Image (cartoon, rainbow, N blue to C red):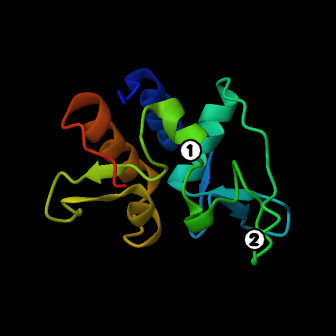
Amino acid sequence: MTVNKERVQLLVDALRSGEFTQHSGALRGLVDSDGQRGYCCLGVATEVALRNGLVVEEVTDPNSVSGLKGQPWEQTYQVMCPAVGHWYGWAEGNPLLVGANSNEPRQDVASHWNDDFNFGFDVIADAFERTYITGHEATPVI
């Protein structure tokens, strides 16, 4: 599978835009009582794909013990649904990112950059750009 650099650039631009409030633990969630939505970096990726023509029917998983819906927003383990990952050219819904310095992980999945390491969207945008547009193209974790 080949990564679509133009689509990844749309994601990089969205992460840097200031439009999205950063959130962790879910692709998209409410961050305040006014209904303001927050997104993890993979949620921004999902929103960008949907805004740019990808059609993903929202599906409810009747077997889910947690009651979570299926694609595109409520994925198990909170990664992008396969259709979104494939739209970018990633084999999986949680692409690997490559760090640039000793303050960043050498390689780790995008959700960890957002949720575990608490990097801001600017740092994550740089990692997507470095990994998939200008530099080393990482192999997504299976």
Q: Position of residue 83 (x, y in %)?
A: 59, 38
Residue 33 quadrant: bottom right
The C terminus lies in quadrant = bottom left
Q: Is residue 57 visible?
A: yes
Q: Which residue is label 1 attached to?
A: 82
Of label 1 and label 2, which has the lower sequence position?
2
Residue 18 in view (yes/no)? no
Where does label 2 land, which residue? 64
Which of 141/39 is in front? 141
| Direction bottom: furthest residue | 65
Dot 2: within a 10 Å radius of its alpha carbon, few (fewer than 14), some, or many (20 or more) residues?
few
Height in image: 3 above or below 70? above
Q: Which mark is residue 129?
A: none
Check disc 1 and give the amino acid type: Pro
| Residue 83 appears left or right of 116 | right
Mark 1 vs mark 2, CA separation in Å: 18 Å
Residue occupying image coordinates x 70% and y 50%: 71
Q: Residue 115: percent from the left, percent from the top? A: 47, 69
- Picture quadrant where residue 55 is located: top right
**Within 10 Å of the Cα at label 1, are there few (<14), some (14-19), or many (20+) other Cα atoms?**
some
Q: Is residue 132 left or right of residue 14?
A: left
The image shows residue 120 at horizontal and vertical percentages of 43, 58
Answer with the quarter of the image where residue 137 lies: top left
**Tag 2 secondary structure:** loop
Name the side, left or right, on which 76 lies relative to 31: left
Question: What residue is at 60 percent from the left and 51 percent from the top?
Answer: 43
Q: Amino acid at mark 2?
A: Ser
Residue 16: x, y in percent? Answer: 47, 41
